Amino acid sequence: MQAVPLLLGVIVVNFLLISLAPGDPVATLLGEYPAPPEYVAQLRREFGLDRPAPMRLALYAWNVARGELGFSFAYRLPVAALVAGRLGNTFLLMVTALSLAALVGVGLGVTAARRRGSGLDTAATGISLAGYSIPDFWLSQLLVLLFAVFLGWLPAQGIRSVREEYTGLAAFLDTARHLILPAAALSFRYTALISRLTRASMLEAMSQDFILAARARGLPERLVLLQHGLRNAALPVVTVIGYNFAFVLAGSALVETVFGWPGVGRLLYDAILQRDTPVLLGVLLMVSATVVVVNLLTDLLYAALDPRVRY
Amino acid sequence: MRTRMMAVFLVTLLATGMAAATPAEPQRGGSAVVAIGSDPETLNLGITTGYAVGAVAASIFSGLVWIDARGEIQPGLATSWTTSPDGLSYAFELRRGVKWHDGRVFTAQDVKFTMEQVTGLYHGRFRPAFQNFEAITVTSPQSIKITLKRPYAPLLRLLTVFDCPILPRHVYQGEDITRHSRNNDPVGTGPFKFREWVRGDRLVLERNDAYWDPVYLDRLIFRIIPGAALRVTALEVGEVDMVADFYLPKTDVDRLKRNPNVRLRLGQPIPSMGFMFINARRAPLDNPKVRRALALAINRVQIVTQAMGNLARPARGPFGDGFKWAFSPESDYNRLYPYNVERANALLDEAGLPRGAGGERPVRLRMVYDAARAPIAAAAAIIRDNLRAVGVTVDLQPMDRAVMIERIYTRPDYELTVQTFTSGGDPAIGYHRIFASAAPGVPFVNATGYSNPEVDSLLSRAAEVPERAARGKIYAQASKILAADVPTLMLFDEIGVDASRATLRGVWIGAEARDRWDAVWVQK
């Protein structure tokens, strides 16, 4: 129930920020030659820019309540269609990146916890440090240089090949190939985060009495580690993954721009430069709604994992 | 055995030798991928001058003429034309048998409709010319006559697909032109038909088999790649086949020169210039002595070498030297304003701006510019350093394009700014706007507040007189005044660089890299 006032707050704050930002959408849109003044005036009327800001805000909120997200200034297309088309691409990238980060991060964290103090533990720490320190757009460019330019193993940009028109399984594999580098770049920081957290969480869980009890009952070490240790260690990790969903979404804008990935992050970046207010507000609204939903799902997952938690 | 191997070797040698000696014949088939930096905002080239729109739509539509790589006007939808001796009347014979992509027949009515209802109303470059039109008369289905109120020398240059793309009357008549659904799915007469647009990713055009010249490519694909460095990478690995000058970061040109798979075209068939607006509304910049001092203090050669990587020539006058006939040796900047710190200092002293105790003069100037354009940012930094040497303090204010437009044009609030304008093919199309009087509020025109009725009158005449030598004389007169007043300091004439994969043949037949894709073919 907190979601509705939250989303309303998002609309108002973002609208105010964008309205206060200098720069006129119409002037930004019309090429590099003086546009006819009547055309400029026509566009301003069309975009509703001849109305005062409070009236525009009220109109926008009323439209959103009716499910109307308006039309893009730059593309003259319904915002909902524009964003929906790109959202799928972003989710593909994010889910892949987060899954990769979770798998590798948890694996690294568990291994590091098991072999605490060993060379493997040190290596895992080193990888984590690199993950925290390296900016993802720089890493992206490095990956492109190595795997696309020098080795020629993977494509440099885009979501699919343009020369060939693949369908079915070939299209799926083509997209998968294009997904590898951007997902790897986006996941690196979160792999680091998750591995550190898992390690710490595992060490804490493994030091609990119930672990001793499980071993005393004669359970195989693997079962002790995964079913008892990891299951308990996973709780903070799940929370952090859910919490970081919003940050991954934000970070995707940079990665999407570097790799030419046609997602919502890049749409947002372009909309800011073009002062395309309806698209900006639409993207921010959808992103906020997504974050709210993901937080809810995280809470539910937490409850599923931890029988002590009841809502 | 040895004899047989020898025979095989000799035959192979002969065959390869023959293949190398035979000139390459255009081959049908294949596709070309062109990198562009953003989605076009529309595909209706008649209502915008946006670069990305032209990149795609120039292959979907046609103009009455096109400009070749030497800058000469060639027939397009118009096969021939005559001009009356007084320069007031142009008669065009139109190409016969041309069909729109939807099968309907192209006629002179389409031309009249386009000029009167579309480009004459909405197009930033064509509209000013259209306001000088007296009448457009359809003399037959295949011929049309344009009469002007006053002569206009560059008229033919404004009839290319980039300035007046001919649109189908049967689609647009009676409808809202700017919001028409066909703006995203256009019907044209060009060598390629629209096929698909996946926003943020690509635009796909396919061959128009009914085009009047042979078209070799099966498909022409535009890949949207916002990152400049990535466009070059994609070219190097072969994911794209062409990156035009507008989208090519100059810092990568040296690397591309060394790449055997990439060919470059250097030069600027359509001249464009970089310059610094000096806001004459702000003291002491209203004093011509101060502006001349700035001209002497700023090292244009340094800007060309360091900021432009030698992909430019230092500006030699108010209209540069891109148009040889419009250049006046009398107003040569090399003679009038060579880099000279002593003379600059002397002029600033004379203008009543002495150096203070710390060596600084009581002048503080804000340099506003587009942060996204690296060469301009570098030029701005060089200017700041040059002016510091003569005691003038410059504060650099990089900002994003939307804000920059507001600060320079909408509510002029700056002292200096570095901008680039294209000439559009003639000084009257693209350079007059730098110096002609203009009210504040309109983007991409004179933003200095400089207004000289004599210059305005000379520029108007230069646009009317048809003959180049006579025009040149008028430009010489205007240059003399402008070189003395220095309302805007011209910095450099750009040298453009277009890059393409070596497998792409028949490229760059037109002055515009975005033009004449029908002539392009892929060497397999």
Image (cartoon, rainbow, N blue to C red):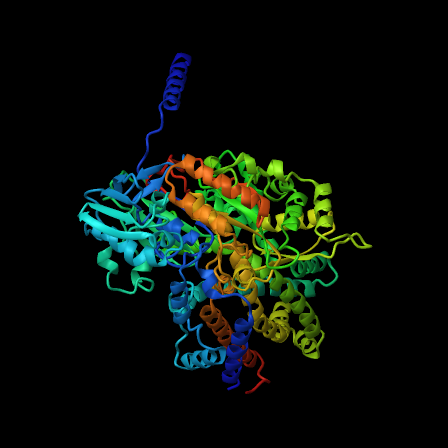
A186, A126: nearer the viewer: A186
Q: Position of residue B153 (x, y in %)?
A: 37, 43
Query: Residue B340: x percent and y percent?
Result: 69, 40
Decide if residue B11 is on the left or right side of residue B333. Answer: left
Can residue B300 be seen here? The reply is: yes
* Residue at x-position 73% and y-position 48%: B390
Q: Is residue A24 above or below residue B213?
A: below
Closer to us: B509 or B199: B509
Identify the image quadrant of residue B315.
top right
Q: How many marks?
A: 0
Residue B142: x, y in percent?
19, 45
Identify which residue is drawn at 59% across, 56% down. B279
Identify which residue is drawn at 36% across, 20% down: B18
Using residue A207 as the reference point, say whether residue A97 is left or right of it.
Answer: left
Q: Residue furthest top?
A: B3
Q: Where does the C terminus of chain B fall, quadrant-wise? A: top left
Quarter occupied by residue B10: top left
Residue B69 in view, yes or no: no
